[in-house]
Amino acid sequence: MGEDLDRSIMTGFPWQPASGYLPGESMEGRRYPNGETYPAWHEIDGMIAAMPAGTRLSFHLNNTKECPYVSALLRGDPEMLRLIDELCSKYRARHIQVNISARGLPTELFTPGEVWEKSSQHLVELAERHPETLFLIPIFQRLLPDSTSADSWPFMQRLLQASSERSSGKPAGNLVAFFDNSAGSGKVPDAVPEIPADYPREVAQPIGFTGGISASNVQDWLSRYSAAAAAHGCKCISDAQSGFREGRDRGKPIDVGALKGLVQSVYQWGTSGA
């Protein structure tokens, strides 16, 4: 939070924007017609130009039928690998969240089996190639329509193991477990998630927490999240999405007053020595 700008992308590619995301086109063709969620690439370029030099951006990769970013990435699609390279180099991504929690994503891509080995390989190789960018992997448990359950923690374990095997026993420091049981719904968690005992300890491995953060509660949750991370010897990362939207709905326009309040609360927390 603070100097980083978080932007989700459902807009094609910088070299081939999706319909509705070209300059001058009607926003009616967009998933969210207000344009403030999933901005077009030329709009992102404009934001970069308007911000202080050196401000880094963050991106969320989602997955829909029209834009299957996550499934294509995990399958090693060349266009998706090119996109990640461009986000990390041209756009200097601070972090990229790979939303394996996206509804409808084939679970075989992140559950034990032959397919997940290839999925983990692609992510580990990207993390090695772009050490300055954090790759956030959502940690969640969810009941599926067929009454089975999906748990993403084993996939995170596999990523860390595969990375360790390639680098003398130490996983890449930019593979990050990101706990968000709200999945963008704005739901406030009941408690700070427990960090698994086998998550890298005392090596300043980043770890992420979020869910339901707003101006009114951000200082409390940042204190609790950072304390949990510090107790495990980790660095803490957090973000907010629904908490500064109208009606706390991530698909609605930004509530400027709520966003200003959130920024002010984060600044106060960060400068108070918390």
Image: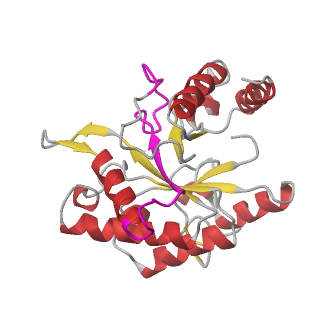
The magenta region covers 165-192
Q: Is residue 110 above or below residue 251?
A: below
Q: Tell me, yes or no, if residue 247 can be seen here.
A: no
Looking at the image, which residue is at 33% across and 72% down? 75
Task: Tell me the quarter of the image containing the N terminus.
Answer: top right
Task: In this rendered view, identify the residue nearer to me: 171 or 184.
Answer: 171
The x, y position of residue 255, in whole percent, is 69, 32
Looking at the image, which residue is at 53% across and 78% down? 82
Q: Quadrant of residue 70?
A: bottom left
Q: Is residue 36 left or right of residue 79?
A: right
Q: Residue furthest front?
A: 168
The x, y position of residue 46, in whole percent, is 78, 62
Q: Is residue 190 above or below residue 73?
A: above
Looking at the image, which residue is at 71% across and 23% down? 274
Task: In this rendered view, identify the residue nearer to me: 195 or 98.
Answer: 195
Q: Is residue 87 left or right of residue 99?
A: right
Q: Quadrant of residue 59?
A: bottom right
The x, y position of residue 86, in whole percent, is 61, 74
Task: In this rendered view, identify the residue nearer to me: 274 or 29.
Answer: 274
